[in-house]
Amino acid sequence: MSKRAQTTGAPKRRRRRQSTADGSPASIQQGAEYRSRAEQEAILQRRVIRGSIIAAIALALLVVGAFVVEQLIIPSQTVAQVNGEPISVDEFRQAYLFERNRLLLQLNQVESAGFDLQQLAQQEPYRTWINEANVPDQLGLRVINDLVDERLLAAEAAARGIAVDDADIQNAVEDYFGFDPTAVAQIGMEPSATPEPSITPTPFVSPTPTATSQPTATPDPDATAAPTGTPTITPQPTVVDPTQTADEVRESFEQNQSDYRAYFDRAGVNSETYDQFFAQNALENRLAEALLPDDTPLIYADVRHILVEDEATALAALEALNAGESFAALASAISTDSGSGRRGGELGESFIGNYVRPFREAIANAEIGALVGPVESEFGFHILQVRHKEERTGADQDSQRERARQSELNDLQEQLREDNSDSIEIYDSWLDYMPSA
């Protein structure tokens, strides 16, 4: 049968168009051709909005993340440890801000008083102040070492059963601002008589040349030197005008204190750091008083010495003195202390707390007239002779006692550093967390 014969003659079924709903690329493209312009713009707008929302969420996450890192994670990082107790970035930053602004305030006060800072930069402690104000890393190193020392002193005070209360802290505040409540209370009253100091002389003994060999310390080349002798910076003292009443002086003190706190508030120093400064001062005052009680006599001595650079020269000088060489002549000839050397080595009578620790300890333990040495100090090697020595007590020794207490506290601080050297860790990362000037 032919093809024509096989047809039924019925109408043929029309071929269906491919649906655009099957999701194939071809169908989507074909469907898009039939969308209106409004539909296409609506789709595009939805895509833009969706992209904007995603970008905003991502940006918000970045901002929140940066905030968490800067405000929570970094401040809690550790820059040093003392006996396992951490010193955080936040504590370091706050202490740095406090010390830097304290320095700047002090230098401004000095300059306002008419002094030339360039001239003062040639002498201490102004040289140190100016250097620390101009070199952030130098100040930062001092601050982090101060924080370490505070931890050590606080632990030592606790071990001795020493604690401070609000009255101790108030006393520290008054001392810092130069306010004497006892003196203020006596304004308008008749002054009372000052008792005479009690002096217990030690009789002079004829010189007996005896050589006493003192052991010398061997410095540790691996030890990290800690800055010592940090200058004490104070605000302007509370000035007492003779015409002011006691109440007016107290008001002046309160205003001075309020202005001082406001200054640090503006600098970004928090209240905890500000208050801790005075609490630490109070603790160190109590510790210093324990090291040198009020009833401890102070030693004054008439001393002469010969200072040389090395131990061998000191031993040779001691041998010459024992052989009868004139102390004055030898001091004039070889002493590297040109000031006393021109006077035959004479230092005169002085409170021994004015001398460095090894020297004053040698004086305290020396017999009158004995040749003592070699004694090693930071200046070299000494041969010394005590000509006269006496103990003094009394109210007129208060200023010297405070100096002696500070020396004792510095000595204790150095000893604690040495004893705890294996338990102190200062990380180089503190340099990365310096506050911006």
Image: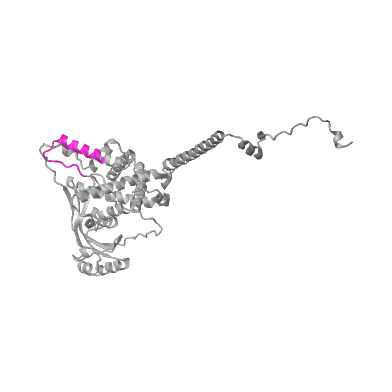
Q: Nearer the viewer, residue 154 or 49?
A: 49
Q: Which residues are magenta?
A: 236-260
Is the image coloured rainbow, by chain, by secondary structure, or in one colour?
one colour
Query: Is residue 77 visible in this depiction of the protein?
Result: yes
On the image, the x and y values in percent for residue 405 come to: 26, 48
- Residue sitting farthest toward the right: 1
Q: Vertical placement of 379 versus 436: above or below?
A: below
Query: Is residue 125 visible in this depiction of the protein?
Result: no
Q: Vertical placement of 208 versus 149: above or below?
A: below
Q: Quadrant of the N terminus?
A: top right
The kind of secondary structure the magenta stretch mainly shows is: helix
Instruction: Answer with the quarter of the image where residue 15 lies.
Output: top right
- Residue sitting farthest toward the top: 10
Examine the structure image and report whether residue 253 is included in the region drawn in magenta: yes
Answer left or right for 153 relative to 183.
right
Q: Nearer the viewer, residue 296 or 83?
A: 83
Numbered marks: total: 0
On the image, the x and y values in percent for residue 108 come to: 23, 49
Answer left or right for 113 relative to 156.
left
Examine the structure image and report whether residue 56 is included in the region drawn in magenta: no
Q: Nearer the viewer, residue 256 or 37?
A: 37
On the image, the x and y values in percent for residue 367 come to: 24, 58
Q: Vertical placement of 268 versus 330: above or below?
A: above
The residue shown at (66%, 37%) is: 27
On the image, the x and y values in percent for residue 101 come to: 29, 46
Q: Nearer the viewer, residue 308 or 261?
A: 261
Instruction: Answer with the quarter of the image where residue 307 lies.
Output: bottom left
